[in-house]
Amino acid sequence: MNKDRIQGSAEQAKGKVKEVAGKATGDSKLETEGKADQVAGKVQNTVGGIKDTVKEAVDDRQIGGIEAKPGAKT
């Protein structure tokens, strides 16, 4: 797990709090901001997941510190 996933999750939580507060107080602007924050958090979390996947793929291609050649059987 990388910092993008952590920050994305935090942004989603912050957005949910804003959304609920906006609903509770009848503040549609705050509610909309909360929904936007949640979407931004989901995007950031997804980016972090992609980074993790790429890093794992790169790590899997390395064998004993020697990088595998493309097309080589591992």
Image (cartoon, rainbow, N blue to C red):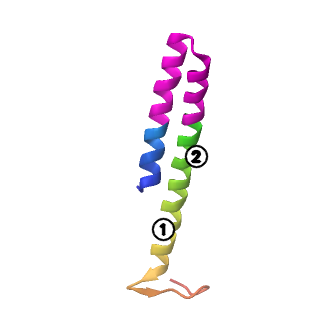
- Image position of 59 (left or right of 40): left
Where disc 2 sits, the SS reads helix
What's the residue at 56%, 23% (across, down)? Answer: 30
Q: Residue 12 carries which label?
A: none
What's the residue at 45%, 32% (across, down)? Answer: 14
Q: Nearer the viewer, mark 2 or mark 1?
A: 2
Where is residue 42 shown, x and y percent of the image?
55, 42
Q: Nearer the viewer, residue 17 or 47?
A: 17
Where is residue 4 shown, x and y percent of the image?
47, 53
Where disc 1 sits, the SS reads helix
Residue occupied by mark 2? 43
* Classed neighbour count for the residue bearing mark 1: other residues with Cα under 10 Å, few (<14), some (14–19), many (≥20): few
Residue type at mark 2 is Val
Q: Say whether residue 21 is magenta.
A: yes
Against 4, residue 24 (above or below) is above
Q: How many labels does the image show?
A: 2
Q: What's the magenta region?
A: 12-37
First in sequence: mark 2 vs mark 1: 2
Q: Are marks 2 and 1 in contact (CB under 8 Å)?
A: no
- Image position of 32 (left or right of 3): right
Q: Residue 55 carries which label?
A: 1
Where is residue 62 shown, x and y percent of the image?
45, 81
